[in-house]
Amino acid sequence: MNKTVSVALLAGGILLLIFGIIAYDSASSDISRFFTGSPTDKSIWLLVGGVVATVVGLGGLMRGSKSG
């Protein structure tokens, strides 16, 4: 994997995590948690996508640094 792609995935993953945390703490997520016991789907997908993109980006950077 290209180092530039790995850095972009890492940055995008961190950005998604930030947006996911903000969505998780929003009023609509609080209302959803009150009635259903779980936060909104949007906040969950942002957090999951952020974690996946961050892990893939870090993995690409680690793999790239060992071989180069």
Image (tube, helix red, strand yellow):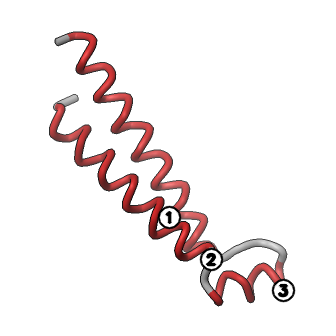
Q: Nearer the viewer, mark 2 or mark 1?
A: 2
Q: Secondary structure at mark 1?
A: helix
Q: How many labels sit on residues?
A: 3
Look at label 3 and name its amino acid: Phe
Quadrant (top left, top right, bottom left, bottom right) of the N terminus: top left
Q: Mark on residue 25? A: 2
Q: Quadrant of residue 57?
A: top left
Element type at marker 3?
helix
Residue visible at 83% across and 84% down in the picture? 34
- Tell me the amino acid under the disc marked 1: Leu
* Residue hosting label 1: 46
Vertical comparison of 58 with 50: above or below = above
Q: CA distance from mark 2 to mark 1?
A: 13 Å
Residue for point 70% across, 74% down: 39
Sequence-first tag of 3 and 1? 3
Decide which of 25, 67 is in the foreground and name it.
Answer: 25
- Residue picked out by circle 3: 35
The percent position of residue 13, horizontal first and vertical second, equals 39, 52
Where does the C terminus fall, quadrant-wise?
top left
Left or right: 36 as drawn, with respect to 41: right
Cα–Cα span, label 3 and label 1: 21 Å
Left or right, 66 with reference to 51: left
